[in-house]
Amino acid sequence: MEYVNYIVIAFFVFFVLQRFLPAKGVRHISAADVKEELINKNKQFIDVRTPGEFKASHIKGFKNIPLNELSQKADKELLKENEVIVICQSGMRSQKASKILKKLGFTKVTNVKGGMSAWR
């Protein structure tokens, strides 16, 4: 019976790590690197914050697709063959968004570390 406890603990640890570790195949850049990336017109820039957060402040060139709408809108509003650069407020939601995009078949996904907090 004791080994059952170890199995439960192992699954819990695995679940927690899966939620917080970066997604495989996702590139990470600093907020300072975003300025250089904005020059490339073949890249897609999305901000996964809420519409209110986006309206309050955003980087010109970024399109607002809130995290909770990303799964439904990604295939309609983004091209899978072009790189997608994702930002949020702190980097946590954009990391989740990066995982969602990878699962949807986007191959070139970049997360902005530190998000808008690091941009200022």
Image (cartoon, rainbow, N blue to C red):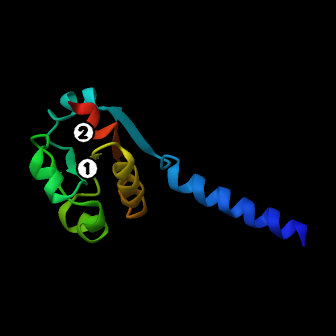
Image point 23% across, 60% down: which residue? 66
Q: Which mark is residue 15?
A: none
Residue placed most toward the observer, 104 or 42: 104
Dot 2: what SS? Answer: helix
Q: Amino acid at mark 1?
A: Asn
Other-residue count near label 2 (Cα within 10 Å), few / some / many at <14 / 14–19 / ≥20: some
Where the C terminus falls, by quadrant? Answer: top left
> Which of labels 1 and 2 is toward the front?
2
Report x, y in % for residue 94. Answer: 34, 50
Q: Amino acid at mark 2?
A: Met
Dot 1: what SS? Answer: loop
Image point 14% across, 56% down: which residue? 52
Report x, y in % for residue 22. Answer: 48, 46
Residue placed most toward the observer, 119 or 38: 119
**Which residue is under mark 1?**
82
**Which residue is under mark 2?**
116
The span from disc 1 to disc 2 (Cα, nearest Å) is 23 Å
Please give left or right for residue 111 compared with residue 50 in the image.
right
Residue placed most toward the observer, 27 or 2: 2
* The image quarter in which residue 35 lies: top left
Mark 1 and mark 2 lie on one chain; the one further toward the N terminus is: 1
Height in image: 52 above or below 90?
below
Image point 27% across, 36% down: which residue? 117
Other-residue count near label 1 (Cα within 10 Å), few / some / many at <14 / 14–19 / ≥20: some
Q: Do labels 1 and 2 touch, CB within 8 Å?
A: no
Report x, y in % for residue 3. Answer: 87, 66
* The image quarter in which residue 76 lies: bottom left
